[in-house]
Image (cartoon, rainbow, N blue to C red):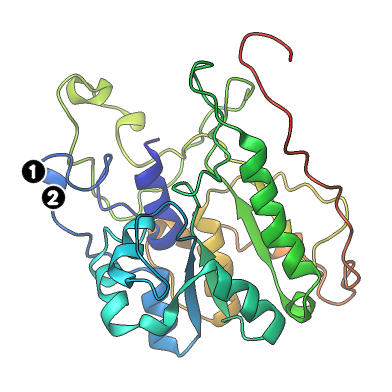
Amino acid sequence: MSRTGANREYVIAATSQGRVYPNGTDANDSSLLTASMIFQELQNAGITWKIYVNPEGSGCSGPPYDLTCLLKQTYVQPFVFGQSIPAKYPQNFATMSQYFTDLQNGTLPQVAIIEPATAAGLDEHASSNDAMPTNVQLGANYAASIINALMQSPSWKDSVVIFTYDEFGGLYDHVAPRPTVSPDGIQPIDLLPGDVCSNATGPICDFTYTGYRVPLLVISPFTKRNYVSHTIADTTAILKLIETRFNLPTLTERDAAQPDMTEFFDFNNPPWLTPPTPPMQNTNGACYMDHLP
């Protein structure tokens, strides 16, 4: 139950090692995270992997782009291993133009993450201030372009896309966070004065509850038609799916406790070998907090 940065750290490492805030918020979280990332496990096991970044609006000059600059657009940068990627694994770091090339050439890695294009203005976040509106349709259209291109490419036949985005619960959500296991027994280390948990204890003041619910779609030729899961899980279940697929060890107690997401699939009779044709995303509308357009 924390901020975007910490939750993203759970997506790629199944822990934030006690961090509640982004790295560098105070002296207690100024060091890099030493936790193993899923990419380390993949590298050690000889499984190909890649991180795709949209360079638009990043301030990074190119092409060719300075990978240490692009690293700042990712959520792997707070990790020791993440910091090593530009120098040690430059072939595993690419821009979105390379993603579309890899689609057509059949050269996608076995595992990839596409980082959010926030700096490019292609975000799904709604604005909380009508004086500073955000066109979420641009972000939706961007996501559609990524997924539709995959569906129309030679890579579709054996791919799975886990599409989830940072729009926690929202005012509409009636389901409270659920109890879960601590990944490593580390309690919050960087609470600030005035935080709710700085003068309180209890389950919500530790890493033993899930965060708020986030939207999640499983897109694949193997995905069951019209299937909605009712299994309680968090985003580290994505890691459990990767670990199950490639016979990798779990990273922490958190992903070890998750379902492996195989319930979403029918591998014997793939329902979507011929991909669907989604409707076009409208990009000329507007959303308002206080009135209809």
State the image coordinates of residue 19 (x, y, percent, origin top left): 25, 45
Name the foreground residue: 263 vs 130: 130
State the image coordinates of residue 254 (x, y, percent, origin top left): 42, 55
Q: Amino acid at mark 1?
A: Ala
Quadrant in which the N terminus appears: top left
Which residue sits furthest bottom? 46
The residue lying at 26 percent from left, 81 percent from top is 87
Mark 2, other Cα within 10 Å: few <14 / some 14–19 / many ≥20:
some
Q: Amino acid at mark 2?
A: Ser
Horizontally, residue 1 falls left or right of residue 25, namely right
Q: How many marks?
A: 2
Name the foreground residue: 59 vs 13: 59
Horizontally, residue 45 falls left or right of residue 140, namely left
Picture quadrant where residue 169 is located: top right
Which residue sits furthest left? 27
Q: Which mark is residue 30?
A: 2
The residue lying at 29 percent from left, 55 percent from top is 184
| Secondary structure state at the residue bearing disc 1 | helix
The answer to whether the residue labelled 1 contacts the one labelled 2, judged by CB atoms less than 8 Å apart, is: yes
